[in-house]
Image (cartoon, rainbow, N blue to C red):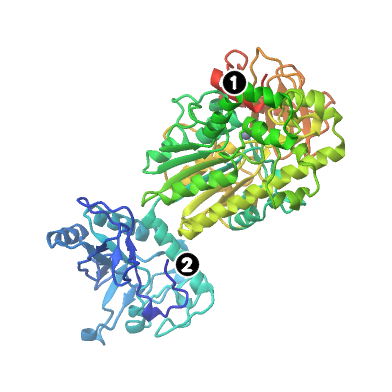
């Protein structure tokens, strides 16, 4: 973009070329310097664009010889440009609210009063022009609203707009003691002073002035680009406490650590369900009842649909085939790339009797069997590794034009089998037998056993040492994924999109490694399964380095995005925007801190190797209460028992308030009756069977 930190005011009359679209000849990108000859612009299609136009000094700010400047007739101005076949104009601005010294009137009283300015005039106290001092921490909406409106007007008329960031020239020529110049120490309430602002000032290092200028330019770009891109990343099966960003002792996530330092991290983000389908469905709709669907009904309005309706290009790259085509999750996406297409081809191969027989004979070395069969079965084959996902994602991003985009990515790597690529395997699990990562695979059966069977037959025989090695492999998978998220961020940075992209990183659920006598997920509402990472980065609106301790739900992501984008929700949402929490305004207020989760299973099946019954839980900062349809409820004091290991239910603990809050929620959220209508769609059942979650 533009370098202004070292420019002298007199030199920084650098126009920012913004987008504009000719009706007869639509362009796909903003003007850029032509790579062939930087004296010319190009619109991205390789041809030089010939600009012709005119401007007048007061075509953006109103000027007047007294304190009530006459409004400029901008519509007439645009009409004039069109009539003269112009395709360019410059929206002029001056930093001086009042100025004096035009050559013809050098010694007169002030020449012109100029409004609006980029910052609000709040006081306390008056600036040198007699009006309230500026607050440089508060932008003036009137300024930016007008900027947006005028650029849009030009856009509609097929005229490119240049926007001044800093005029500079006015500071050099027209300052006087009563000019009210905002960056003079006596004219703002922030104690910021540019040391005169007259003549040539060279600022070679970031300082208070350049940070004000940074913020102004960022706000201006956000105003003109209007809607930022959205990149929503789900790390399937990633529990929060295995990320170094969440205090894990192993350095698993240096890239996410950096993203968290530049954004806001939610220390207690709670997934609404401990498995992929309900967690994703409710996450992207912010409707709890969506989490009770096995194929997402088209009546639900998804994030992709809402953003698409607001001009977004929408795309999804999904490694987990539970979300693939025909799951209902694809609604609203212009483009869906699901790696499992590859997997389906492999699965057909495996059904060819000869190949199946060869596999059963166990004549291949175990690694080869794993490579041939198990990777297929667990959907983490060539089509679904983070590398492959990134390739698809980067290709999609490269294709985007000037419209904002929404890209949803599901990475599957931390899901079992735990088969980390190098160098992460050596770094975190050096010397560990790779076969341990395929612990659910049975060479005797020639296939993987179900997750429930694994808990019943294999888990009790695993030594603590073996479990620790499996965890090391899992950690290495997380580290690999973190590295690849870093690479995807580099793609955005290289295209200059990173700061203009709202980045959300989360997980749909966690994973168990023998805690509570359970393994994998979809087993309970344990902390290991529902406490997930949630990090958001968007420099224009989300403060850097903030860590929010208040428990929040994944159902809050969508309302937060909508508020950031200024898009009113098309339908009622169950979650609420996290922005007040991020901005610390909502701490201690009602409505945050109670989080709800559920695990509803088919009533006609038994789930013997999981926590019993349908489960509905209330989890706060202080406690976790889990209601079970079998009556085997649980209550944990999280302040004394952060891993929720000691069930206090029935021990005389007063849970009346927890019960009431859960009952209220069930009524409100549509979870009063849960036995009648839980039916898994046949395709979802097939897919779950392939993943090993049902038999
Ligand atoms: Zn999942």
Q: Secondary structure at mark 2?
A: helix
Residue 312: x and y, percent? 39, 44
Q: Is residue 148 above or below residue 293?
A: below
Q: Position of residue 635 (x, y in %)?
A: 77, 29
* Residue drawn at x 70%, y 53% as measured from the top left: 423
Residue under numbered circle 2: 214
Q: Secondary structure at mark 1?
A: helix
* Sequence-first disc among 2 and 1: 2
Observer able to see residue 639? no
Q: Which residue is mark 1?
A: 685
Task: Kindly identify the residue that appears in the image at 49 percent across and 79 percent down.
Answer: 203
* Near-viewer residue (42 or 231): 42
Q: Are marks 2 and 1 in contact (CB under 8 Å)?
A: no
Nearer to me, 425 or 262: 425
Callout 1 crowding tier (Cα within 10 Å): few <14, some 14–19, many ≥20: some
Q: How many marks?
A: 2
Judged left or right of residue 17, residue 353 is right
* Along the line of sight, the residue nearer the viewer: 397 or 255: 397
């Amino acid at each position: 973009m533009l370098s202004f930190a070292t420019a002298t005011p007199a030199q920084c009359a650098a126009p920012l070329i913004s987008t504009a679209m000719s009706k007869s000849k639509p362009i796909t990108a903003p003007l850029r310097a032509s790579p062939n000859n930087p004296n010319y612009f190009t619109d991205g299609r390789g041809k030089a664009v010939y600009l012709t136009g005119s401007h007048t000094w007061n075509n953006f700010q109103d000027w007047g010889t007294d304190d009530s400047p006459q409004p400029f007739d901008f519509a007439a101005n645009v009409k004039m440009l069109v009539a003269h076949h112009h395709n360019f104009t410059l929206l002029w601005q001056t930093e001086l609210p009042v100025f004096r010294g035009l050559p013809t009137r050098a010694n007169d009283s002030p020449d012109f009063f100029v409004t609006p300015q980029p910052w609000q005039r709040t006081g306390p106290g008056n600036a040198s022009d007699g009006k309230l001092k500026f607050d440089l921490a508060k932008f003036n909406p009137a300024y930016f609203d007008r900027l947006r409106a005028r650029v849009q007007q030009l856009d509609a008329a097929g005229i490119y707009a240049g926007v001044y960031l800093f005029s500079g020239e006015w500071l050099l020529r027209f300052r006087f003691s009563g000019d009210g110049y905002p960056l003079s120490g006596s004219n703002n309430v922030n104690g910021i002073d540019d040391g005169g602002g007259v003549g040539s000032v060279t600022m070679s290092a970031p300082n208070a002035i350049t940070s004000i200028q940074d913020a102004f330019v960022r706000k201006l770009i956000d105003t003109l680009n209007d809607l930022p891109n959205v990149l929503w990343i789900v790390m399937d099966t990633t529990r929060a406490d295995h990320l170094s960003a969440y205090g894990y002792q192993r350095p698993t996530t240096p890239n996410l650590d950096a993203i968290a330092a530049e954004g806001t991290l939610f220390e207690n983000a709670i997934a609404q369900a401990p498995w992929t389908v309900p967690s994703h469905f409710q996450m992207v709709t912010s409707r709890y009842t969506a989490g009770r669907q096995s194929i997402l009904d088209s009546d639900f309005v998804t994030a992709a649909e809402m953003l698409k309706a607001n001009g977004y290009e929408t795309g999804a790259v999904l490694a987990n085939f539970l979300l693939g085509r025909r799951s209902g999750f694809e609604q609203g996406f212009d483009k869906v790339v699901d790696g499992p297409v590859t997997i389906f081809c492999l699965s057909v191969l495996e059904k060819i009797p000869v190949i199946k027989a060869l596999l059963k004979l166990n004549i291949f070395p175990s690694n080869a069997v794993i490579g041939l069969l198990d990777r297929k079965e667990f959907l983490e084959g060539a089509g679904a590794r983070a590398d492959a996902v990134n390739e698809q994602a980067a290709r999609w991003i490269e294709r985007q034009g000037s419209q904002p985009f929404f890209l949803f990515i599901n990475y599957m790597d931390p899901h079992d089998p735990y088969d980390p690529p190098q160098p992460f395997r050596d770094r975190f699990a050096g010397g560990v037998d790779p076969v341990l990562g395929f612990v659910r695979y049975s060479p005797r059966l020639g296939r993987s056993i179900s997750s429930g069977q694994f808990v019943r037959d294999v888990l009790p025989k695993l030594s603590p040492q073996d479990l620790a090695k499996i965890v090391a492999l899992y950690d290495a998978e997380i580290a690999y994924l973190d590295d690849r998220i870093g690479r995807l961020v580099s793609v955005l940075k290289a295209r200059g999109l990173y700061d203009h992209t709202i980045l959300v990183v989360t997980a749909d659920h966690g994973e168990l490694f023998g805690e509570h006598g359970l393994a994998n997920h979809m087993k309970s509402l344990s902390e290991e399964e529902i406490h997930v990472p949630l990090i958001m980065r968007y420099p224009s609106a989300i403060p850097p380095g903030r860590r929010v301790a208040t428990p929040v739900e994944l159902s809050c992501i969508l309302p937060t995005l909508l508020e950031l984008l200024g898009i009113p929700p098309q339908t009622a949402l169950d979650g609420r925007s996290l922005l007040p929490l991020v901005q610390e305004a909502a701490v201690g207020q009602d409505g945050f801190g109670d989080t709800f989760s559920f695990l509803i299973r088919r009533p006609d099946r038994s789930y013997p190797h999981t926590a019993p019954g349908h489960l509905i839980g209330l989890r706060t900062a202080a406690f976790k209460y889990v209601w079970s349809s079998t009556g085997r409820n649980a209550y944990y004091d999280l302040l004394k028992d952060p891993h929720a290991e000691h069930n206090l239910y029935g021990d005389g603990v007063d849970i009346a308030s927890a019960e009431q809050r859960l009952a209220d929620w069930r009524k409100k959220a549509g979870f009063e009756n849960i036995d009648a209508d839980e039916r898994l769609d046949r395709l979802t059942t097939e897919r779950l069977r392939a993943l090993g979650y049902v038999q």
